[in-house]
Image (cartoon, coloured by chain):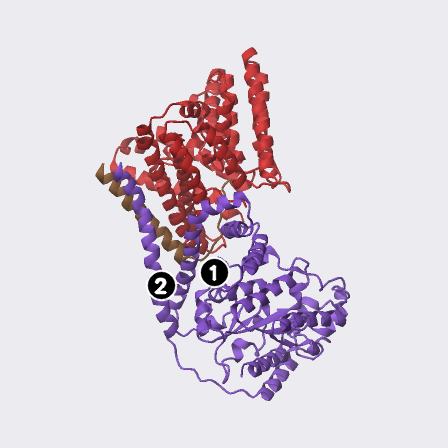
Amino acid sequence: MKRKVICVLFPIIICIITVILLNSFLDKKLEVMLENKDLTEINIAYGSMYKDRGAVYNDYLMKNNYLALQGSSEFVVPVSQLPTKVFPIKGMEKVVTNGRAYFQTLNHASILGSENTDNKEKKVALFLSIQWFFDKNGADPKSFQSNFAPVQFYKYLSNPKITEKNKKIYAARMDNLLSGNSQFASEKLYASIYINDGLIYKIAQVLFKPYFIFRENIVDLKDKGLLYRRLKLLNEKKDVQVRDVNWNEEYKKAEEEAKTKATNNDFFVDDNYFNKYIKNVNAFKDSKKNIDVTNSEEFDDYELYLDTCVDLGIKPYIILIPTNGKFYDYAGMTKQSRDDFYDRVEKMAKEKGFEVLNLKDEEYTPYFMFDVMHLGWKGWTKVEEELYKHYN
Amino acid sequence: MKLTQYGDYLYLYILFLTFIPAILLRLSGYTTKYYGIIASLGMIILIMDITLGVKLFIVFLVLEITIIYLYLFIRKKTDNKYLYWTFLFLSICPVMSSKIAGITQYSSYIGFIGLSYLNFKVIQIIIEIYDGKITRINFITFLSFITFFPTLSSGPVDRWKRFEENINAKLEKKEYIKDYLIIGLKKIIMAIAYKFILAYLINTYWLLKIPTNVTILNSIEYMYAYTMYLFFDFAGYSLFAVGTSYIFGIKTPDNFNKPFLSKDMKEFWTRWHISLSRWFGDYIFSRFVLNSMRKKRFKSRFTASHIAQLITMFIMGLWHGLTVYYIIYGLYQGIALILTDIYQRKSSFYKKHKKEKWFNFLQVVVTFHIVCFGMLIFSGFLFK
Amino acid sequence: MKNKDFGFALISSIIVVLAIFILVFEPFNDIPFIYNQF
């Protein structure tokens, strides 16, 4: 009888030992590889799971004073002025992008909250898009889930620097946004246990504790394991010549390039974009007339992002992405309502002591935007120059 | 929160939690009948979607309980054939309407997880009531039979009499540990290996990497990969179902027995998805053959058997779904069985060598390929 | 008797280790194979 019990316990003990050994193996290997490998491919990648849906890589970036540009789809716009093409430059050698399409403030809050912050000088710039605030409910569950990272979720909720109040708000949002997806059922369960106090939840908390210990450890290991696989394929670090940048020249180059790409329309958007998406201009008249940018869940998520930064001691540089003014006017959204929005989100950030780059006055600058809502040739140059000035 | 049964580790953890009371009950010599119903209701809510699925399940349950008890009562008075057919037809209605709805826009509104398998349990009872084999049905035992969660989503298909005896029998502690608990745990470990390791690796590193355009080379590769994936995934699921049953003290019959060692298609169907093929064998094939012999419908008993094979396999194909490739799959299996039978009775080459080792090896290889090609049809890869 | 138990412990340990390796080195996936949904 005793032998049978030992035989059943044996695999469980092996399980625990394996997890512990794997963890220390991966920690050691990652430490070495992160120092010695050329990380450029990951740093300039758009939508990289190691940056966007991981934690350990971001920890490395943060410890090494990288500037994190937190945005969404503007990072994949086909212009030569993208930060992944412009940086590194003298004075800004370490820049990475975080985020891809459908990233909103909640995702970026998760990234910041999941980092092992000891670095008070952490450099973060948030690219805030007005489009995130178009829907009353803010982020859409399916889109949110495609960018969700369990490892960030658990780390946020166990980050000692974040207040309980903010954690409860965060968990409540997660409980809401993770519905309908069985892959993240564990996290949804964790979130609902976190925010509820009833007896059933207390019982569930006890019953599922062993499971969540397992799950938290596994997602953490998975983050490390996947990064390990990726780093193994990279080459060794090599010396890189860092160029000097003359911003006036960059503007000239941007304008020259833009003039060849945006030729066939009155909105100064890229030709291909125009042909593909808005050629039938009349169809878009007043199409955005009924959009209300004063009432969205995203404002609360943005507030949570700012409060998370306060808790973590991070001072983000909030960049307010403008729209293509001419197009949006035509589509029925008044300049006044847009300006009210920009001023409102600027105020929210300034109240926490953060600095803001409000680009509302660039909405009519030709070639500033690539299309109706993404930064383009001159827009990116402007933002990069401002970032340079802000961090130097 | 809706989980796929045996689909991920969260479900497995919840499953292990349900084991604890079951094991404690059995170790103390008690039955798991009543606890089983409660645990099953919980699992049903977890597995079926709560907005519609669970409600449809309740409707199904009420309907079938009514049909069974009504017919049980009527059968005591008369064994009228037409009444029998009426009740039989009524009991088949749920799965039939689900399959028919499956090809219309209403497919997600008419059906719930496990309906196709659950219905077999009820049909079988109606048939045996008519046969006179079942004369009384204890309601609680029946409820535990129908809601029995380990086999809920995809079988194996158990039979009423076997289950009834099993769940009402007294189980001594020593016998439970030796013949149920240990075996059940072993099956669950194997299930993890089959489903979470082997099936996962075959899918991720082979099946998903095959290009989707239908060429001869792709089809051949897909044929092997899909068959192996299907086997490990479904055999893994079945091991979970059977292993869990054992832990509850129920010896649900196994679904797979080294199917790729089959020397011919007849043997294959005694080794693959066993509970299903035995069900079809007992309740469609055998009855049609016996009925045909009695009515002298065909000249020879072999013809009767062949027609029965075709009909049985055709229905099996339809049961999977009313799509072109499932129907062709059914017919393919029927024809394979017919040709096998003819070959084995008529071929002198076969009769001469059938006991020789090299010939047996050849048989296994050929049968494996007949199976794989059948699975290729079943997968729908050729019909995209 | 002894060998059987030892074998069980060994095989289940191997399976557990393999399962952990897959969990650690494989990305999140959703491949729900649902045979006979209804």
Check the image and report above or below for A140 versus A370.
Answer: above
Q: Report crowding for label 1: few under 14, some 14 to 19, many 20 or more residues within 10 A (C-alpha).
A: many
- Indicate which label's residue lies in the foreground, 1 or 2: 1
Would you say residue B8 is visible in this rendering? no
Check the image and report above or below for A366 versus B342.
Answer: below
Amino acid carrying label 1: it is: Lys
Q: Report crowding for label 2: few under 14, some 14 to 19, many 20 or more residues within 10 A (C-alpha).
A: some
Q: Drawn colour of chain C?
A: brown
Percent position of residue B111, x then y: 58, 37
Q: Which chain is indicated by disc 1?
A: A
Q: Drawn colour of chain B?
A: red
Q: Nearer the viewer, residue C17 or A302?
A: A302
Check the image and report above or below for A105 versus B91.
Answer: below
Would you say residue A94 is visible in this rendering? yes
Residue that badge 1 annotates: A155
Image quarter of residue B352: top left
Percent position of residue A317, x then y: 58, 75
Residue at image x 57%, y 15%? B74
Q: Which chain is purple?
A: A
| Label of residue A311 in the image | none
How far apart marks 1 and 2 lie (CA) works out to 18 Å
Residue that badge 2 annotates: A26
Q: Earlier in the sequence, mark 1 or mark 2?
A: 2
Check the image and report above or below for A55 versus A366.
Answer: above
Which residue extends farthest top?
B77
Percent position of residue C1, x then y: 23, 36
Is residue B52 rendered to the left or right of residue B377? right
Image quarter of residue B366: top left
